Image: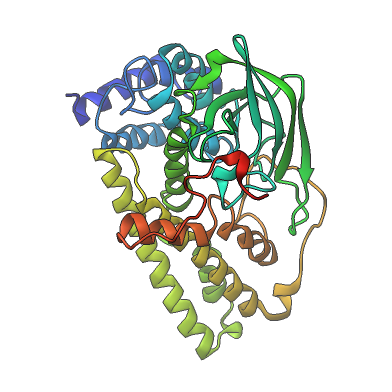
Amino acid sequence: MITAEELRGATRELLAAHPPASTDRLDFLRARFDAGLAWVHYPQGLGGLGAPRSLQAVVDAELEAAGAPDNDPRRIGIGLGMAAPTILQYGTEEQKRRYLRPLWTGEEVWCQLFSEPGAGSDLAALGTRAVREGDHWVVNGQKVWTSSAHVARWAILIARTDPDVPKHRGITYFVCDMTDPGVEVRPLRQITGEAEFNEVFLTDVRIPDSRRLGGIGDGWKVAQTTLNNERVAIGGMRLPREGGMIGPVSKTWRERPELRTHDLHQRLLKLWVEAEVSRLTAERLRQQLVAGQPGPEGAGMKLAFARLNQEISGLEVELLGEEGLLYDDWTMRRPELVDFTGREAGYRYLRSKGNSIEGGTSEVLLNIVAERVLGLPPEPRTDKDVAWKDLAR
């Protein structure tokens, strides 16, 4: 098995052959992928070297010290955190080689066509239909809350292919070309003023069967890989101490002593400790991933992420008093990424309200933690053995 020293050597060879100061950014990223230094734990030829996941930090440290460009992971987070691990696990060799390289370099942005107006928390109730016609599937339906759909080339899509079986069993997983005829993306303006999310209408969209991931009717099983990785990607991101939401409010506390009160001090201390515990727990979760695929524990991290963001941003608005009520810009924009710490407190307060909805609602995640982590009895489900077509809607 490859060692840390061997990885350092491979990284230095990459830097020598493609000096960051004189190499085009995209050319460098492609070369890094081809050298197996993108995801070191992925197989050879697919951006990795089959090394332990924990050794990725060795490569990253060498590249950062050399000033090498990264792939702007916040902009392509859905591809990196959700699409890539799903393609790796369920894709054919042809699919892996077609999609993974431009996904990692950021040449092709991905989005996620899962939630629907009538199937959000109860995702398995989705009604978007895919009907087989020869070597293609004809897809009709509507998806909602789709981040990055306005800039995405590809989408991971789940659709109902068999309405005559219970809802979890009649779903199939596809890769959808967002440039195909019949794909319409409309902005959804949020409370922040931006339209970071979208709704997507699919009208007679033809998807080749060669873009199916997993077996026909196995879409729910494939989607669990996506969802488990999504929760880890959202709630378990790597942060330095005082990274994320706790950073700006801590900075304000230190620089603005006239705003301090005893009550705010006690609340800030409590949230600072909780944020640090959450950060360290996320680090432990990432280390556990070295041994296998993410499990339901990611749901707990996502729960903590949402609650802490909302409480911290609320405290920041209170700390600032009248200043906290100001808002810099209500302009309708369609950003490529979310920057929580790049704007003012009012934006953070409003945007964090979505944290308990996106990536799985907190209510659903509480059920996952209760049933799959703590082993508590599941809630009664009267629709478990009822064909989807017979469900009340």
Farthest right residue? 331
Relative to 224, 129 lies left or right: right
Q: Residue at x 32, y 63 (%)?
A: 376
Q: Looking at the picture, does residue 100 appear above or below residue 360? A: above
In the orientation shown, which residue stands out farthest toward the bottom? Answer: 262
Q: Describe residue 79's horizontal placement relative to residue 280 as left or right.
A: right
* Residue 72 in sight here: no
Whole-percent x and y of residue 94?
45, 11
Give the residue at x 30% y 42%: 289
Image quadrant where one finds the N terminus: top left
The answer to whether 176 appears left or right of 96 in the picture is: right
Residue appearing at x 52%, y 88% in the figure: 263
The number of numbered badges drawn on the structure is 0
Q: Position of residue 335 (x, y in %)?
A: 71, 43
Q: Please, which colouring scheme is shown?
A: rainbow
**Above or below, 84 relative to 301:** above
**Image quadrant of residue 41?**
top left
The x, y position of residue 247, in whole percent, is: 51, 63
Q: Position of residue 121 (x, y in %)?
A: 57, 53
Along the viewing direction, whichever of 282 and 82 lies nearer the viewer: 82
Q: Is residue 382 visible?
A: yes
Front residue of 25 and 128: 128
Query: In the image shown, does 105 or 250 lie closer to the viewer?
Result: 105
| Whether residue 141 is situated above or below residue 360 in the rendered picture | above
Q: Is residue 122 left or right of residue 276?
A: right
Image quadrant where residue 160 sits: top right
